Amino acid sequence: MLSDQDQIVENLKQLHMPTIRRSYEEVAGQARAETWSYEQYLLELLNLECETRRQNRISRNLHLSKLPPSKTFENFDKKRLPPKVANHLSVLINGSFLNRSENILAFGNPGSGKTHLLCAIGHALIERGKQVLFISCSQLVQDLLIAKKELEMTKKLKKLSRFDAVIIDDIGYVQQSREEMEVLFTFLADRYENSSLMITSNLTFSKWDKIFKDPMTTAAAIDRLVHHSVILELNVDSYRMEQAKNK
């Protein structure tokens, strides 16, 4: 016959509670020493299990996000942000815009910190339990073209829809061919009012005809993105240029 300890371990294995399985004896000793109630002891164990699962979920989502590890708020100079952008930060970090399927559109010259800012927000959202994907526009388009060629576009869009936010970096950096433009527009339309997009671009809306070629398609794409959005204008000098001058 199994001892009480062995039965506890076996039951915890079946219930998939590894943290409680590792900790219950140590916590029991602490509970006896500090005369905890049964409820206090149980609560401590459950808190340990929940926190471990939360941390594991964050680690898993961070790995899937493909976010650059270094682009967080820990090494981002918030003092460089224009006041209007800085005032929006707390709202963006809390993730409430995701509940409304709003988009974040960051515009500015190369080196102004657009990518770092959106990545830092992405890291903060993952800490809050959200799922985020970071991908360059060129890579996204190539992935979509492959999915279309293999007749798996619907499957690909469904996979991308699982992310609460998709960060598309440099949407105007590479001028798209018509076929590339079509799959990009399909993706933008699929996300419209369903999930959030976070986009960086060096091009103002008036130059987006270079991306989508056709004026009507350009207008339709902009309309979908702007309808529910927060626009961040980073009209600041290049951070990389500043560093070079300081050196």
Image (spheres, rainbow, N blue to C red):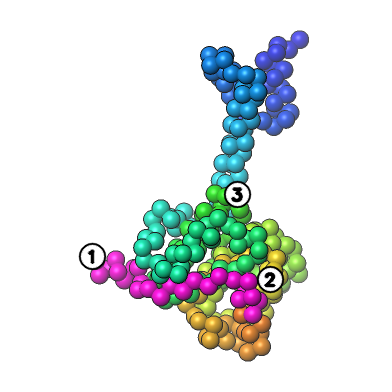
Three-letter residue code for mark 2 = Tyr
Q: Position of residue 50 (x, y in %)?
A: 62, 36
Mark toward the viewer: 1 or 2: 2
Find residue 247 and name its label: 1
Residue 192's mark? 2
What span is colored magenta in the figure?
223-247
Give the x, y percent position of residue 73. Answer: 43, 56
Label 2 close to label 3 by CB (< 8 Å): no
In this view, the residue in front, 137 or 162, is 162
Q: Residue furthest left?
A: 247
Instruction: Identify the residue at image location x=61%, y=53%.
Output: 130
Q: Residues within 10 Å of mark 1 (few under 14, many from 20)?
A: few
Examine the image and state in which quarter residue 150 appears: bottom right
Whether residue 90 is visible here, answered yes or no, is yes
Label 3 belongs to which residue?
A: 129
Q: Is residue 77 left or right of residue 44?
A: left
Residue at the (29%, 66%) spot, across then down: 243
Residue 54 vs residue 170, the one in the foreground: 54
